[in-house]
Amino acid sequence: MPTSFFEWVAFFVNKYGLFFIQGAGTTIFIASIGTIAGFAIGLAVAVVRTIPVEENDSLARKLFYKFVRFIFVAYIEIFRGTPMIVQAMVIYYGSAELWGLDMSPMVAALFIVSINTGAYMAEIARGGIISIDKGQYEAAQSIGMTHSQTMVNIILPQAIRNILPSIGNEFVVNIKDTSVLNVISVTELFFMSKSAAGTYMRYFEVFFITCLIYFVLTFSVTRLLLFVERKLEGPDSFVIHGSQTVPQAVIKGGRE
Amino acid sequence: MPTSFFEWVAFFVNKYGLFFIQGAGTTIFIASIGTIAGFAIGLAVAVVRTIPVEENDSLARKLFYKFVRFIFVAYIEIFRGTPMIVQAMVIYYGSAELWGLDMSPMVAALFIVSINTGAYMAEIARGGIISIDKGQYEAAQSIGMTHSQTMVNIILPQAIRNILPSIGNEFVVNIKDTSVLNVISVTELFFMSKSAAGTYMRYFEVFFITCLIYFVLTFSVTRLLLFVERKLEGPDSFVIHGSQTVPQAVIKGGRE
Amino acid sequence: SVKPLSEDELAVGLECNYAPFNWTQLDDSNGAIEIKGGGGFCGGYDVEIAKKIAEGLGRKLVIVKIEWDGLIPAVNAEKIDAVIAGMSPTEERKISVDFSDPYYESDLVIVVKADSEYAKATSIQDFKDAKITAQLNTFHYTVIDQIEGVKKQTAMESFPAMIVALSSEKIDGYISERPGAISAMASNPEFTFVSFEEGKGFVASPEDVAVAVAIKKGNPNISAINEILGKISKEDRQAIMDNAVKTQPALGE
Amino acid sequence: MSNPVLTVSHLKKTFGENIVLKDIDFFANEKDVVSIIGASGSGKSTLLRCINQLEKPTSGDILFHDKNIQDSGFSLSNYRAKVGMVFQSFNLFNNLSVLQNCVVGQMKVLGRDRKEAEQRAMDILSKVGMDQYISAKPRQISGGQKQRVAIARALAMDPEILLFDEPTSALDPEMVGEVLNVMTSLAKTGLTMLVVTHEMDFARDVSNRIIFMDAGVILEDSTPEEIFNHPKNERTRMFLNRSIRNT
Amino acid sequence: MSNPVLTVSHLKKTFGENIVLKDIDFFANEKDVVSIIGASGSGKSTLLRCINQLEKPTSGDILFHDKNIQDSGFSLSNYRAKVGMVFQSFNLFNNLSVLQNCVVGQMKVLGRDRKEAEQRAMDILSKVGMDQYISAKPRQISGGQKQRVAIARALAMDPEILLFDEPTSALDPEMVGEVLNVMTSLAKTGLTMLVVTHEMDFARDVSNRIIFMDAGVILEDSTPEEIFNHPKNERTRMFLNRSIRNT
Ligand SMILES: Nc1ncnc2c1ncn2[C@@H]1O[C@H](COP(=O)(O)OP(=O)(O)OP(=O)(O)O)[C@@H](O)[C@H]1O
Ligand SMILES: Nc1ncnc2c1ncn2[C@@H]1O[C@H](COP(=O)(O)OP(=O)(O)OP(=O)(O)O)[C@@H](O)[C@H]1O
Ligand SMILES: [Mg+2]
Ligand SMILES: [Mg+2]
């Protein structure tokens, strides 16, 4: 049996290495799909929630929007406000017990993580939208764009850049939150570690490995998002087209 | 013994009501302190990280800032990148085992939640800062404000409003994340529920109550933050002072 | 280097949610002890044993409520003196902590729904094709392999989780020790459990079915604890367990 | 040609208790070029914003070809596509290049295909001298360049009416000349224009009507000759006197 | 009074490969009022931004009272407190009221106490006719009102030099007159001013020197009479001709 910390680490890597990698695979799969789907849900919810209701809209329309907004607020509050472990159990076991629905754990997991992330993303996206100068919205309206056209073409592209750091947070949280899914028997990284740790009652060594894997996962994700952030900021220079003073010139402009 | 779902619920409320409230108290206490302290840490980190390094700064100064930024990035990546349960165990048990530090569980809990939240908040705050028009920063610089004066007086007041929805997310997450602190023997709401559930082997009924409490907590927090958001947006009207055309008039202006 | 634990107190760590070994209740009835830092009183078989050990060592018993995964780190960090939490002294665990002699031995049963076909089973082999699981990090999970052709499910975090899985019929049964099964039945009348005669049940090494006190490696109190445990006869133990099963909150009132 | 393109009647706009527009009545016929002049804060921008429904009027009606634009059946999107607006603060789309700024509305709102839209955008951008900068982002161009792109963006939509809020404020005098030429030639094509301006020369030489606003009311609405030579109102006289002294 | 307050030598600024300022040399003496004129995009704003170090020059020196402001020992904060700037896009602090916009710098940078700072701010705000609006937020005031607040904010710092980027572009002619009066009287108190402007009358009547910029270079730097009557350069002549024709 190993005696020192690092001997233990080596021991676990040897014995459980494959499982760790398998678990990490599941984790990153669920987290990625969940974050992307949640992001889409969040944007959609935020876009709908920001539809302006005008005074001269018909009563039916007003009531309809009121209702839709209420539904969305309820969705956000309920899915943010309750622990994911409970959501997982209610959706997975509850649906089986009540309607005899036989979801596979993985499908349930993807569904739960997406819908849960969506609730957080909806608020993040709202923050992003209110951070954009009102003039941008007005200018788009003034050329006749509808609310959704304005959002998709003008507001969201700018908002997304501002909220990327928060989206990174969500992704990282998802990588770690998948751990509660073992309650519906999804076997991801944290569950693997717990099995290994619990069997030998060596928490620090196993979690050292787990943390390293988590860290590598989240770090890569962060760097990736930082890269996206730079991309969204756009290039530093532009090309001057067919300048008349300097014919054929391809001059670049830059920014600080 | 109760037989139906709601009888069970009533039974648990009667029997464990006080403990649920006690647990909820601990939860909201840790989450509040943790969020506020984490918010302060996050703002501070983001402010320092955005200090511009000028080309004509001395080499020592440049290196120093490079170093500080590295430290902060490492802090963010490590504390976001590893599970809080592991952080809790390492900080509480590890510090006792290695340096004989005898923290009380509550002190450790507050420390861990704050420092962990700080890592997320740092990114959220960064998103808030980049969402503010560069002209605001330049205008403050142009009247001679230092970086920190600019941040404190001009940029952050505007950024904070934009990131309030994300801060709400963090608060809500903290309310739920305190549950991992059971591992260092902090008895909060979730652990209380587990005891009740484990003692009677009833899961759904107990967690139904827990969810309700969580929901009430997070819902109140959300509403509170929404109120703050409205406050930060400022009043809709302003007072016209000593108008010459309408002497003594106190006229209000509004906005859409 | 660690600040020595108080010589007057015996700090014992457990979860207080694993009836009938340990549970949480509201008052000190039936000999329950107040949990350190508030949160109710902890009673159960483990607590009765802990009381006897504390008494024998001449110390005051302090109950510290800690999540399962924190128990061993806590004893190693000397935040507590001992773990008395229905923990089995497996070979693997012995690498990290020392265990006392066992203070209880039980047999393994399978909890099923009362109206299921498996309720009439007599041998573990009758569970062919059944979806069976057990708690994570217990030997219960490993013995499932002894059933031929079983559909072994992923291990689960906690007993309540398994109970939910069982009542929604995502699983057909889960492995438990007899006392736990009694508790589960008490509050879930639609459940029953199947026990097995000699030779038809699970084969398990004695240390797996036993539970023992865990203490930090090299702790000299081990012999004193063993001596105290040795004085509790098999009959006494059964009496204490019977009492615990009877007085646990799920059966109370 | 008998009915006005745009009719504003009894328009009132208050922010809180601050009455910014008091009781505005006016109309614009086809091919009208109406200059709106008046002191800073007199409500000129607010009036344009009300016409384009970016502010909801507190009361009063706005008719476009005799249809009330505030009726619930009225399609604001179609209306706005026909009523262009150049903002005092430009409000270029920050995420789009100069060319895309002028293309996106044509494609999304008018349904033009990319090629057609880019062709039209290029035409107009070269008219305002910005064809070299088509790939620049708004933050990379100067104030005057932004203003020209803002004008081009509005023109690219081929609107029926154009609302200009100080379209030449950031331009150098040379450029002012060119932009005014563009506007004058637009006027000839039948475009109706409402132009908030501080350029008294433009008001006098290009527009066929001038509206003088003061503190939320229209004090005069008349031909340039009339206003410059025989202002009815004392306040108008004062304003013009000082304006002419300074210009 | 022998040495210039501000000296710019061999200043060059490129964005990527786009050379915006080529080789700028000029100085400003105490009490100088220098107008900077030139076409849109010629680099006027960029020059002011370099002087205030909001853009780092690619090369070249800027001396303030003979001290190089780009030296590592030089305190930019002190320098900027002495060099006021009015931006083309105003950049009022959106989170502060009109009064606070003019107070915050005085308190934080100059260390004045609130009472003194508010007194000073009120003085200046009433000079530009904005004393009624002190509790309004920037989003609640009109373009011209914003511009006046921006000017007041800069003046409240009691700077030695003021850099104005089109300080009257959003003002009505009446207001232009008043703001120019304020500036003229400031000039008399010994304030040095660099004013980017499209108001040829201001350039001619108020300033004692005019700099004409074109495509990143200074084509002329001379007295108003000289430039308006005997422009050395063909380009200058063209620009002024067209300007005067249009104004
Ligand atoms: N951040 C930037 N990135 C790239 N190019 C820029 C940037 N800022 C300015 N430029 C370019 O530099 C040139 C000069 O800009 P500047 O703002 O100095 O012009 P200006 O003389 O102030 O014009 P205007 O009178 O229109 O305000 C412009 O062609 C512009 O495209
Ligand atoms: N959103 C708002 N909230 C409160 N008051 C406002 C708002 N917008 C405008 N006002 C007030 O309404 C008045 C008229 O503003 P408006 O922008 O229409 O003036 P303007 O005639 O365009 O002036 P300028 O020539 O300076 O642009 C101003 O006094 C302003 O303070
Ligand atoms: Mg205006
Ligand atoms: Mg400029």
Image: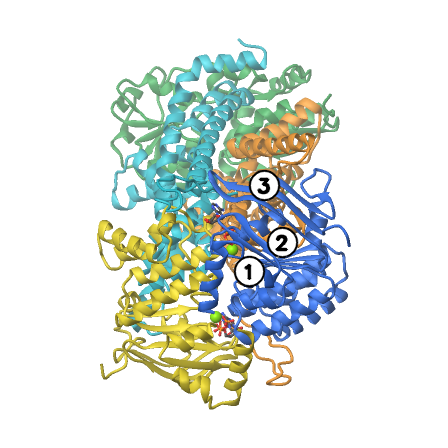
Chain colours: A cyan, B orange, C green, D yellow, E blue
Asked whether mark 2 and ligand 1 are closer than 8 Å, the reply comes as no
**Whether residue A10 is visible:** yes
Q: Amino acid at mark 3?
A: Gly
Labels 3 and 1 in the same subunit: no
Label 1 secondary element? loop
Subunit of label 3: B
Tell me the distance, in whole angstroms, between the alpha carbons under discs 3 and 1.
66 Å
The quadrant in which the N terminus of chain C is found is top right
Q: Which mark is residue B118?
A: 3
Residue D162 sits in quarter: bottom left
Subunit of label 1: E
Q: Position of residue E215 (x, y in %)?
A: 48, 49
**Whether residue B219 is visible:** no
Residue furthest bottom as drawn = D232
Residue bearing mark 1: E230
Tell me the distance, in whole angstroms, between the alpha carbons under discs 2 and 3.
27 Å
Q: Position of residue D242 (x, y in %)?
A: 56, 79
Label 2 secondary element? helix
In this rendered view, identify the residue nearer to me: C34 or B174: B174
Tell me the distance, in whole angstroms, between the alpha carbons under discs 1 and 2.
41 Å
Q: Is residue D103 above or below residue A171?
A: below
Give me the residue at 52% from left, 40% from top.
B195
Q: Is residue A173 above or below residue E119?
A: above
Q: Amino acid at mark 1?
A: His
